Image (cartoon, rainbow, N blue to C red):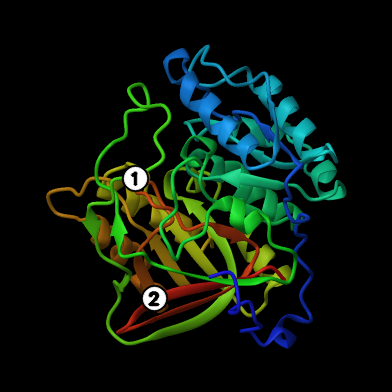
């Protein structure tokens, strides 16, 4: 957690030969946050929730700029060229200090060939925040440009209170380069669906589920380090092995001592997740993994394969710890993860923790 524990927990000399990750400046009150929907937009009946989430940011002292790509003419907020242009404008505008979408969607992949990654790499780093289909964009940007991105709550989830000892994405984005922070599982999670049409100003989750992190691959304590990278299985499986997900090259350039790879299933059944993870492994996505963090999921099991079984079937041969039910998926609450940050994952009989250093 942020505070006295913000100390060096890594032997950073091990990373001296690696190229540095570029971190955005700390987000401060008065800074401008851009809102755009690179994938799905917000329907009229949910616009009050979007407006309330923007109001929450303004109440916390931030300026908010709503983009033009926010509606729902189809399953995407606008044609690909328009969505790419607006996202590029926000990511390269020095006045915009963070970019966050309302939520994910389905086909953000159509933006990748339209993004000018060289321009993003040349610009002053900006926090790009999100999860689900937004992993289709933030993860390639980190892998290709070396700019840290933030796998965390989307805008529509931002008003919710964050249970300790987790942090909100705003907490993480406010930290200066070099900071270290530790998060633990709160031991509770949500089960039900929140209807924003009935209560667009909701700020409290109903966290009725219980349970923390555990190993899928066996017993014994875990204490491993590596740079963090990962995201939604259903989206990243389509990038593995392409020029937009050069995970082995990223590891060689930025962290020769290995990665902490995190993955989470958004909704596909266990057969599909098993196939996707096998494909990602064959494409080298896990080659440099020192451990794999697996997000808690509501995605369905199948008659002969559970979601846990799917992970084991595809990844047990890696011979690294597989730590499940981490709060990095589609089940709230959310544990923000910084793509590119140095991570230390620990798990023992007393529970688990993840320490991240923005270095």
In which quadrant of the rendered view does residue 186 lie?
Answer: bottom left
In which quadrant of the rendered view does residue 34 lie?
Answer: top right
**Mark 1 or mark 2, earlier in chain:** 1
Whole-percent x and y of residue 335? Answer: 47, 58
Residue designated by label 2:
352
Image position of 263 with respect to 267: above or below: below
Label 2: which secondary element: strand
Q: Residue at x 39, y 34 (%)?
A: 202
Q: Return the residue nearer the eye: 32 or 126.
A: 32
Q: Are marks 1 and 2 in contact (CB under 8 Å)?
A: no
Label 1: which secondary element: loop
Whole-percent x and y of residue 177? Answer: 75, 66
In the displayed structure image, the side of residue 224 where residue 86 appears, left or right: right
> From this viewpoint, is residue 287 visible?
no
Whole-percent x and y of residue 145? Answer: 76, 53
Image position of 203 with respect to 341: above or below: above
Whole-percent x and y of residue 354? Answer: 49, 72
Image position of 54 with respect to 242: above or below: above
Q: Residue at x 55, y 79 (%)?
A: 225
Density class for disc 2 (Cα within 10 Å; few <14, some 14-19, many ≥20) is: many
Q: Residue at x 60, y 73 (%)?
A: 3
- Label number found at residue 205: 1
């Amino acid at each position: 957690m942020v505070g006295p524990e913000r100390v060096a927990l890594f032997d950073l000399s091990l990373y001296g030969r690696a190229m540095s990750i570029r971190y955005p400046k700390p987000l401060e009150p008065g800074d401008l946050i851009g809102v755009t929907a690179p994938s799905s937009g917000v329907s009229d009946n949910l616009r009050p929730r979007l407006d309330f989430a923007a109001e929450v940011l303004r109440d916390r002292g931030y300026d908010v700029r709503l983009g033009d790509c926010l509606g729902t003419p189809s399953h995407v907020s606008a044609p690909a060229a328009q969505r790419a242009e607006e996202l590029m404008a926000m990511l390269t505008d020095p006045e915009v200090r963070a970019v966050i979408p309302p939520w994910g969607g389905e086909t953000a992949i159509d933006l990748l060939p339209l993004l000018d990654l060289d321009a993003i790499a040349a610009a002053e780093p900006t926090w790009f925040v999100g999860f689900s289909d937004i992993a289709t964009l933030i993860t390639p940007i980190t892998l290709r440009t070396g700019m840290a991105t933030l796998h965390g709550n989307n805008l529509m989830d931002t008003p919710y209170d964050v249970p300790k000892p987790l942090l909100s994405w705003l907490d993480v984005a406010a930290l200066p380069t070099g900071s270290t922070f530790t998060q633990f599982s709160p031991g509770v999670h949500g089960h039900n669906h929140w209807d924003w049409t009935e209560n667009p100003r909701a700020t409290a989750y109903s966290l009725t589920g219980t349970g923390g992190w555990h190993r899928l691959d066996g017993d014994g304590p875990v204490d491993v380090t590596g740079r963090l990278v990962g995201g939604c299985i259903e989206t990243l499986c389509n990038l593995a092995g392409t020029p937009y997900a050069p995970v082995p090259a990223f590891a060689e350039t930025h962290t020769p001592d290995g990665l902490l790879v995190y993955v989470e299933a958004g909704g596909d059944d266990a057969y599909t997740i098993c196939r996707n993870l096998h494909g990602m492994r064959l494409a080298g996505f896990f080659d440099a993994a020192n451990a794999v963090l697996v997000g808690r999921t509501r995605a369905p099991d199948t008659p002969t394969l559970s979601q846990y079984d799917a992970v084991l079937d595809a990844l047990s041969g890696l011979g690294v710890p597989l730590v499940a039910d981490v709060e990095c998926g589609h089940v709230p609450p959310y544990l923000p993860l910084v793509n590119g940050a140095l991570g230390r994952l620990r798990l023992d009989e007393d529970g688990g923790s993840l320490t991240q250093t923005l270095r």
